[in-house]
Amino acid sequence: MSAGERQEDSSEDMSAGLPPFKWLRETFDGLVQSFKFPNSWGVRYPEDGQTGADAPAGYITLFWDYFTEGNFRLPATRFFLDILAY
C-alpha cells in the first residue's frame, strides 16, 4: 500500500464520525467578504452533507473559529502550511 493510499483511507476514516457542516451560505459569504479573500484563492462553500474532512484535493478546511477566536489571517505563513501538510 502506498503512502497516498494510506492518506486516502485515513481521510475516509476521519469523515465517518463527523457531523456535516451547518453553515448558512450567508454566513460563509460574510466571512469571505469581511476578510477580503481574493477570488484567486478559490474559496469554496461546502456541498450539502460534507464534513471538515471532505475538502477536495488541493484544499484545506478552515473553521470560523480560526479567524474569530484564533486571529488567523490569510495568506498563511509557511510555518502554518508546513503544519497542515504534516
Image: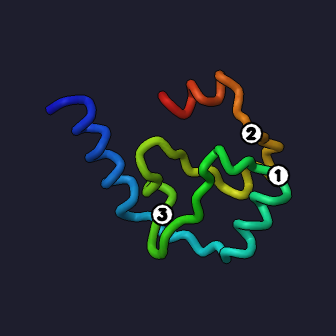
Q: Tell me the residue that label 1 is attached to.
A: 35
Is the N terminus in the top left, top right, bottom left or bottom right quadrant? top left
Q: CA distance from mark 2 to mark 1?
A: 8 Å
Residue 54 lies, in percent from the top left, at 43, 57
Q: Tell me the residue that label 3 is attached to.
A: 51
Q: Would you say the residues marked 3 and 1 are in contact, meaning their CB atoms lie under 8 Å apart?
A: no
Figure quadrant of residue 83:
top right
Residue 38 lies, in percent from the top left, at 73, 47
Residue 76 vertical placement versus 27 (above, below): above
Q: CA distance from mark 3 to mark 2?
A: 22 Å
Residue at point 79%, 66% (across, down): 30
Q: Farthest residue in the front direction?
A: 40
Tell me which label, 3 or 2, sits earlier in the chain.
3
Q: How is the image coloured?
A: rainbow
Q: Would you say the residues marked 2 and 1 are in contact, meaning their CB atoms lie under 8 Å apart?
A: yes
Q: Mark 3 vs mark 1: give the one in front.
A: 1
Residue 9 lies, in percent from the top left, at 26, 47
* Residue type at the position of mark 1: Phe
- Name the element at disc 2: loop
Residue 29 lies, in percent from the top left, at 73, 67
Q: Tell me the residue that label 2 is attached to.
A: 74
